[in-house]
Image (tube, helix red, strand yellow):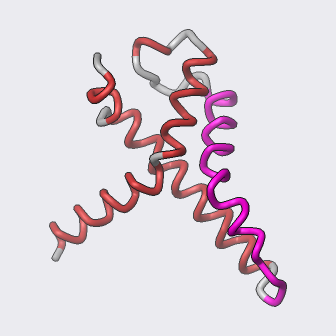
Amino acid sequence: MNILQLLISWQFLTLALVISAVTTTIKDTCESIWILADVKWWKVTNPIMPLAIGAVFGLAFSNFPYPELIQNNTVGQVCFCLVAGEFSSFVYRFVKAAFEKEIG
């Protein structure tokens, strides 16, 4: 399996969408709790939040159906999740645009 096949695999796309959903949920929850507070912290944490969530996911969920190359390698799983976290917003925008095009 080459790198391009890995980046468009269902495991990668699912993981990226989950990371995007978790990031958005954390952001929306924190902003609704501190609605009157100055929430400039998101500008600082926004670039690293998907990476952190990906790393935690890679360490915590070893039973996720990772690709064959990294199924028994924890470092590989964490790296896979870090890359999925980095691409999560792009994958979300791509999937959203595809659904909007199909639905109309």
Is 31 included in the stretch rendered in magenta?
no
Q: Residue at x 43, y 12 (%)?
A: 69
Range of residues picked out in magenta: 36-61
Viewer-side residue, 53 vs 86: 86
Residue 19 horizontal/vertical position (percent):
54, 49
Left or right of residue 79, residue 9 in this image = left
Q: Is residue 2 above or below residue 96?
A: above
Left or right of residue 5, residue 70 in this image = right
Is 44 included in the stretch rendered in magenta?
yes
Q: Residue at x 46, y 56 (%)?
A: 89
Predominant SS along the magenta part: helix
Q: Residue at x 64, y 61 (%)?
A: 46
Q: Residue at x 29, y 16 (%)?
A: 1
Q: Quadrant of residue 95?
A: bottom left
Which residue occupies the extreme bottom position in the image?
36
Residue 15 horizontal/vertical position (percent):
47, 41
Q: Quadrant of residue 52?
A: top right
Count of marks overlaid on the render: 0
Viewer-side residue, 15 vs 89: 89
